[in-house]
Image: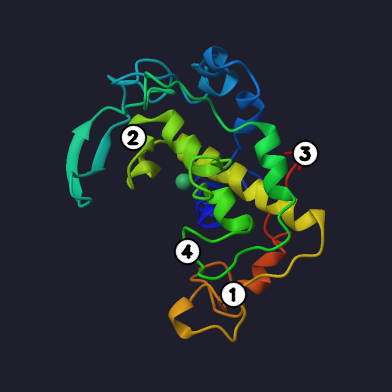
């Protein structure tokens, strides 16, 4: 999904070298909790700040940026027309929490398997720890914790509403690349797993407009034909 978006940016901007930036949130997560909202990613010339609604930066209330679709109370998508909302670290004001720390990222890079049965939100392995589901509460909640920390529109399933969504996910892709580079890796589930696991099995194809033939999960283990990172020191 990130490659498809990046190609669309390149097409619209007429710049074949444009790349979606990543936000190294673990670098901010190593700072004291009260300093984490004051970092460069939230500057006026970058993603802007927090608030209900956001009042600074390029996506501030009163500017051209509007939220048009949001997640309703029962999960359905509903039409709206309102400014962007964020609430840094405010999910539980009585139990303040910070962004993921670098030590938590280092811990997931040592996972030797990509995924495990039952291939869901309770599985061991790299995939589920990066997503941020297991083991409950004591886990390094990497990707999910970033959504929750930013808060506001980054919380529900309509979280792509917030442009910082893509900077979070670009960093998740960077962690994935760092994991692939750290040791020889095997993608699972294997092709012999039940069809109910499609399209997640190794040789299942991924929807794509990049190539004439849709690539398989295995073929996406090497993305160097599409993009590289300036720095994999996550
Ligand atoms: Cu996400």
Dot 2, crowdedness within 10 Å: few (<14), some or many (≥20)?
many
Left or right: where does residue 21 sit relative to residue 197?
A: right
- Residue extending farthest to the right is 183
Query: In this rendering, is residue 224 above or below 75?
Result: below
Image quadrant of residue 114?
A: bottom right
| Mark 2 or mark 1: whose residue is earlier in sequence | 2
Instruction: Find out if the beta carbon at label 3 lies less than 8 Å from the nearest ligand 1 atom.
Output: no
Q: Is mark 3 on a helix, strand or loop?
A: loop
Q: Distance between the residues labelled 4 and 2?
A: 25 Å
Image coordinates for residue 173, horizontal then vertical, percent:
62, 50
Q: Distance between the residues labelled 2 and 3?
A: 29 Å
Q: Are marks 2 and 1 in contact (CB under 8 Å)?
A: no
Residue identifier under label 2: 153
Residue identifier under label 4: 120
Residue identifier under label 3: 233
Q: Distance between the residues labelled 4 and 1?
A: 11 Å
In this view, the mark in front (3 or 1): 1
| Mark 4 or mark 2: whose residue is earlier in sequence | 4
Residue identifier under label 1: 189
| Mark 4 or mark 3: whose residue is earlier in sequence | 4
x 49%, y 25%: residue: 97
x 45%, y 30%: residue: 149
Image coordinates for residue 88, horizontal then vertical, percent:
43, 23
| Mark 4 or mark 1: whose residue is earlier in sequence | 4
Query: In this rendering, is residue 78 above or below 219?
Result: above
Dot 4, crowdedness within 10 Å: few (<14), some or many (≥20)?
few
Instruction: Find out if the beta carbon at label 4 lies less than 8 Å from the nearest ligand 1 atom.
Output: no
- Residue 116 visible, this orientation: yes
Q: Is mark 4 on a helix, strand or loop?
A: loop
């Amino acid at each position: 999904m990130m490659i498809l978006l990046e190609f669309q940016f390149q097409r619209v901007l007429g710049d074949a070298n444009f790349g979606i930036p990543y936000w190294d949130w673990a670098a901010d997560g190593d700072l004291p909790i009260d300093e984490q909202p004051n970092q460069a990613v939230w500057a006026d010339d970058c993603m802007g700040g927090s608030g209900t609604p956001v009042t600074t930066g390029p996506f501030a209330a009163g500017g051209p940026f509007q939220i048009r679709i949001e997640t309703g109370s029962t999960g359905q998508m509903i039409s709206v027309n309102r400014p962007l909302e964020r609430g840094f670290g405010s999910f539980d004001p009585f139990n303040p929490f910070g962004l993921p720390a670098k030590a938590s990222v280092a811990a997931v890079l040592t996972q030797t398997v990509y995924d495990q049965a039952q291939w869901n939100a309770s599985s061991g392995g790299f995939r589920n720890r990066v997503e941020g589901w297991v083991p409950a509460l004591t886990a390094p909640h990497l990707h999910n914790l970033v959504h929750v920390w930013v808060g506001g529109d980054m919380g529900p399933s309509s979280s792509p509403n917030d442009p910082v969504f893509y900077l979070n996910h670009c960093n998740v892709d960077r962690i994935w690349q760092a994991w692939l580079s750290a040791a020889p890796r095997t993608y699972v589930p294997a092709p012999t797993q039940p069809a109910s696991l499609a399209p997640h099995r190794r040789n299942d194809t991924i929807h794509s407009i990049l190539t004439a033939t849709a690539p398989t999960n295995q073929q996406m283990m090497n993305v160097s034909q599409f993009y590289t990172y300036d720095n994999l020191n996550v």
